[in-house]
Amino acid sequence: MDVRFVLLPGDGIGPEIISQTRRVLEAVATKFGHAFEFTECLIGGIAIDQTGDPLPEATVDACRASQAILLGAVGGPKWDDPSAKTRPEAGLLRIRKELGLFANLRPIAPFAELLDSSPLKREVVEGTDILFFRELTGGIYFGPSSCTTLTGGGERAQSTMVYETSEIERIFRLAADAARTRRKKLTMVDKANVLEASRLWRRVCAKIVTEEYSDLEYEVVLVDAMAMHLISRPSTFDVVVTSNMFGDILTDEASMLPGSLGMLPSASLGSDGPGLYEPIHGSAPDLAGKGIANPLATILAAAMMLRHSCNLPAEAEAMEHAVQRVLSAGHRTADLVRSGEPSLGTVEITDKVLESLTGG
Ligand code: NAD
């Protein structure tokens, strides 16, 4: 199979983890007889430095012409000046918008080998395997907002949660389809006891379940209760779907379950066109250039990319199993060990993944 990928290394540790992940993708192509073509483009702070724009037009064009996009991370102290004309993160928001990426997928499935790194007790986290679907382009982050000065002093600010039926339907169906391929349980999280927008979510989702997905076990949970359940009984959830702001908060809460940011991938998908895949962590400026960043979240994001955008599930599984075997063999990067314990660098742990992939 011929596939054209765009790589967006970005800033900080981005170039280090993307170049190592590219080695793994090249090995997968060789092992399975595919031709993967890679185009590297600018995004974020480095794009501001070189072009003045965090998302140059050439990057957007290359992304549109690709089958899938793999991003490292953007941002860093160099571009943090609040009075700057633009910021690296603006590039990320714009690429999501340009490509209509309305669904953010975040799998939370801690590796058995790393359970003791979790801040929660092993017996609580064990068996957790959640796939979150967060609505990414609507809701309170994009609704009308304003801030006005009051005549008697002070100010009044407002942000509005707005959703239309079609925005709810498209992400809900994606989540329901995914639940069908997993353990057939779907949880919708809202705040329908207070918010009108949540009541629309509840009606729209209930109708779709009744008419199209009666084979699924379906439940609705209020967001405040969900925040508690995620740390008391995370292993009882399968697919979870929710709106933009609730998803933002709950996925960050859930990302603590596996114990390290360096292990978690995510995907942003639209109705058609390329998907965008990335680790959930940032550009880790404190580690940039030291050769010790953990590349495994990016390698796992590339596995998601093969599964969701290229329909190559066997290749995705091969990558995931290679990572699993590396951990089982006891290999760790610095973020996964206590200080003073031996660890491998970015290149060395990727070498282990490659050995496992080509030997397995
Ligand atoms: P961060 O995720 O970069 O780092 C948080 C902590 O986790 C740091 O101690 C870092 O060393 C560690 N860490 C992160 N990734 C790691 C990895 N792969 N291996 C080992 N350790 C890792 O978050 P931050 O420090 O809040 O943000 C740094 C910069 O990244 C900021 O400019 C922020 O805006 C940006 N950021 C970008 C994205 C993105 O590109 N999607 C996401 C979050 C933050």
Image (cartoon, helix red, strand yellow):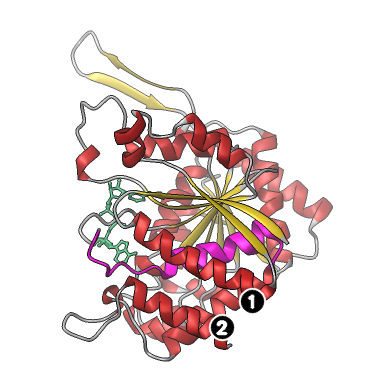
Taking the view exactly as shown, the residue that stands out farthest to the top is 151
Residue 294 locus on image (x, y percent): 35, 69
Residue receiving disc 1: 31
Q: Nearer the viewer, residue 118 or 85?
A: 85
Whether the residues at callouts 2 and 1 have beta carbons within 8 Å, the answer is: yes
> Which contiguous range is marked in magenta?
289-312
Helix, strand or loop status at disc 1? helix
Q: Nearer the viewer, residue 154 or 97?
A: 97
Examine the rendering and report whether any part of residue 188 can be seen: no
45 with respect to 254 (left or right): left
Q: Quadrant of ligand 1?
A: bottom left
* Vertical placement of residue 71 versus 167, above or below: below
Residue receiving disc 2: 358
Report whether the residue tagged 1 is closer than 8 Å to ligand 1. Answer: no
Quarter of the image for residue 335 reads bottom left
Report whether the residue tagged 2 is closer than 8 Å to ligand 1. Answer: no
* Vertical placement of residue 132 versus 42, above or below: below
| Local crowd size for mark 1, using a 10 Å CA cut-off: few (<14), some (14–19), many (≥20) | few
Helix, strand or loop status at disc 2? helix
Residue 211 locus on image (x, y percent): 83, 51
Magenta span dominant secondary structure? helix
Q: CA distance from mark 2 to mark 1?
A: 7 Å
Residue at screen point 71% across, 69% down: 184
Residue at screen point 62% across, 46% down: 66
Mark toward the start of the polypeptide (2 vs 1): 1
| Local crowd size for mark 2, using a 10 Å CA cut-off: few (<14), some (14–19), many (≥20) | some
